Image: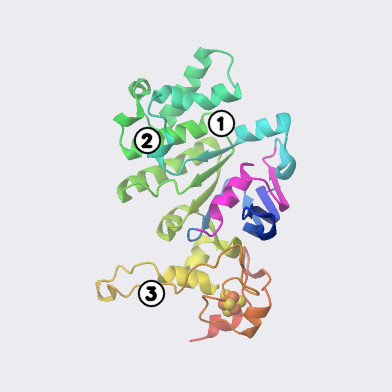
Amino acid sequence: SEYLIQTRDLSVGFPVGGQLFNRRVLKAVNHVTLAIPKGSFFGVVGESGSGKTTFGRALLNAVPITGGSAHYDDGEVNYDLGDLAGADLKEYRRRAQLIFQDPYAALSPRMTVRDIIAEPLEVMGLCKSRDEVDERVREVAAMCRLNIEHLRRFPHAFSGGQRQRISIARALVSRPRFVIADESVAALDVSIQADILNLLKSLQDEMGLTYLFISHDLSVVAHTCDHVAVMYLGQIMESAPTRQLFEAPRHPYTKALFSAIPSLDPDDKGKVQRLEGEIPSPTNRPTGCQFHTRCPSATDLCRQKEPEMEICEAGHSVSCHRWQELQTAV
Ligand code: SF4
């Protein structure tokens, strides 16, 4: 298969509410069907509360899948992520890794950089000797452009960018195939962000990685990802090759997200168009189209009937009743 990950109607729900009589299910991910090509830099964007992080966690087997399916196939092994156990689960944990969101919080201050990077190898029992561990740590540190001298130091001695390199080395030391980067550059200065993104790109080529890049930041996604899926309230609203999505967005939500990007034109200063209203609660979903409570183009049909995902161009799909008419509207 040309896809590393394929989900079909994937849902993740959590029970909320302490008492039995008011217990409800919070569906953080709601019927997501996506295919992530091997070797891609696949972006998922959305506001906070869109379910993008939970979607990533479900693909890491870190939260239970409560509906639909997710399939992993890297050519050597293939797994249904819904029922992984035992040796398969262990192997999948090696092949699928997460780069943490906040390098300041993620690294233990009492461990040396060497021990931080080595820990996954030790936990997973991937090496036979301490020498082998050291060799793997040195190898991945060099790939992440960390100075070998630094391995003996503690993380507080490093800048945010260097700490993020340490997190990346830790995620890659087990030689994964699939790497989820969740807001991995959000805490960094813009110039450092670019360094880290370039590093991720070069590691992708060297190690044959497929990334799922989760972000709220459209400008970061535009420069990094080859394909982007836009998530809202646990669902995919639109999914397209990055270029197509940015040049010809079809979904009113995608258009609203784009118009919320501050313009660089000084004449436009302060004319940032904000998206009106709040994301509805996933425990109390709207009927029909999930976006209708904030959509400027909503009609009665939108309020009553949920739109299907439609293909509008090769590789480009959209979930909106009105995408065709809105395309031609002035
Ligand atoms: Fe807006 Fe209707 Fe399209 Fe939903 S289906 S995005 S409410 S126009």
Horizontally, is 82 left or right of 166 in the view? Answer: right
Q: Residues within 10 Å of mark 3 (few under 14, many from 20)?
A: some
Q: Which mark is residue 273?
A: 3
Residue 290 drawn at (x, y percent): 60, 70
Q: Which mark is residue 175?
A: 1
Is residue 72 on the magenta stretch? yes
Q: Earlier in the sequence, mark 1 or mark 2?
A: 2
Span shown in magenta:
49-75
The secondary structure type at the circle numbered 3 is: loop
The quarter of the displayed image where residue 63 is located: top right
**Total numbered circles:** 3
Q: Earlier in the sequence, mark 3 or mark 2?
A: 2
**Residue at (45, 22) in percent of width and height:** 115
- Per the image, the residue denoted by label 2 is 163
Say which of 241 and 162 sits in front.
162
Q: Earlier in the sequence, mark 3 or mark 1?
A: 1
Residue 89 drawn at (x, y percent): 69, 34
The secondary structure type at the circle numbered 1 is: loop
Say which of 219 and 289 sits in front.
289
